[in-house]
Amino acid sequence: MSDRAFVHAHVPGAALPALVGQVIVIATGNDGFCRFKYAPEWLGAEHAFALDPEALPLENTVFDSPPGWEVFGAMRDAAPDHWGRKLIERSQNRLGLSELEFLLAAGDERTGALGFSTGREASVGSPAPSVTLLERLVEAAARVERDEPVDVDLLRLLWAGTGTLGGMRPKTTVESGGALWVAKFPSREDRYAITRWEFGALRLAGRCGLRVPEHRLETVGTHPVLLTARFDRRARGGIRERAHYLSGLTMLGLHERDYGSGGYADLALWLRRHGAEPAEDVRELFRRMAFNVLIGNTDDHLRNHAVIDFGEGYRLSPAFDVMPWPASGGERVQALGVGRQGRLASIENVLSDAQQFGLKPDAAAAELTRLQAVIQRDWRDAFRNAGVAARELALVERVISPYTPSRG
């Protein structure tokens, strides 16, 4: 088992990644931790940036992670999540990989700008598969879900595209028109057409004025596949540049086991300290929080928020993983703190701490009223155009209607 890795970063304008430093896992388990040190050449480079402005500032020192962290949060953000780990384990035919082994195994199209290798030279992985292979990739993902045999070459393609995309659901990255797109597939566990619901929610968010990635819905065989443009990539001067990526979890210095900790106001504070356009981004964050409450997106945990930096400073990423989630009854709560009433999903709670987002009470109330009006006017059209069936539209309405009452 490898206990150390060199960390590399793609920097704007450069075709090849640069050496950033080395991470060493000192121990594993509940009391395990890792140690990281920046390389001297990185500290002296004009393009150098801190992997995490708070936990890993750009200093010539040795950093130890908190107990129980096998890697630092900024590195964990570049590691595969549940679906990616399943593919890696399937491809390598082994279980029980360490956090560092997952980092080393993830494909070249991992989230963000970081890369990991066992040597000082950066490893170059396989490119993302073409969008023309979507039908085969959808079938391969379905076979993985069913624990059925999958063609080895196709499994490698699926793995190369998945990289470190987050979440539990089947997905991969594909190349289309010279750009990279996340392709989200239906799952055998779906009780309703989740890819259609998410497409409808993204359309609705865009109509509400939220920043969303370019997106489209394609029918692949009989399966609706949601394609969203990778916002951590952009084309500049013939080079596909990669943005450094920090999840909300890393921004707040929290671990997966800290689920339910932190809130939107904490993210706003981080943006004011480290963001390139804090005033604009904290207002966008307020709109996003209000939108999530109004449409019943209770899966708004810290991994579903992020900042990206293309070398011009941290900006709040476009919204992603947004959709209504039918409640099982009882009081609705968000995954993040909303206001002075904690995680309670209520209009009053959204407005209770508006000053944390640079908004006076009247301005916050006006923005909330505007969002309610757009959602009430457009939600049905957005979801119907996504191909959501009539019986499921009724379910969406039950989720949304308590927060956007009809105006009569």
Image (cartoon, rainbow, N blue to C red):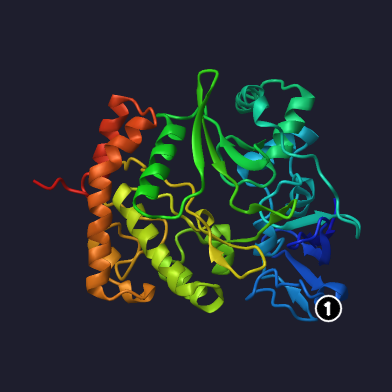
Amino acid at circle 1: Gly
Q: Residues within 10 Å of mark 1 (few under 14, many from 20)?
A: few
Residue at 81%, 55% in the rendered image: 15
Q: Residue at x 33, y 48 (%)?
A: 296
Q: From this view, report whether residue 105 is shown above or below residue 266.
A: above
120 with respect to 27 (left or right): right
Q: Is residue 358 above or below residue 320?
A: below
- In this rendering, the count of numbered labels is 1
Along the horizontal axis of the image, is 255 left or right of 354?
right
Nearer to the camera, 232 or 404 = 232
| On screen, residue 235 above or below 168 | below
- Residue 329 makes an appearance in the image: no
Residue 240 location in percent, x, y?
72, 51
* Residue 222 pos. (x, y %): 51, 18
Q: Residue at x 79, y 62 (%)?
A: 25
> x, y percentage for residue 363?
26, 70
Q: Is residue 343 left or right of residue 348?
A: right
- Where residue 90 sits, quadrant-wise, is top right
Q: Quadrant of residue 328?
A: top left
Residue projecting furthest to the left: 408
Check disc 1 and report the residue beneath it: 44
> Camera-side residue: 15 or 345?
15
| Relative to 287, 312 lies left or right | right
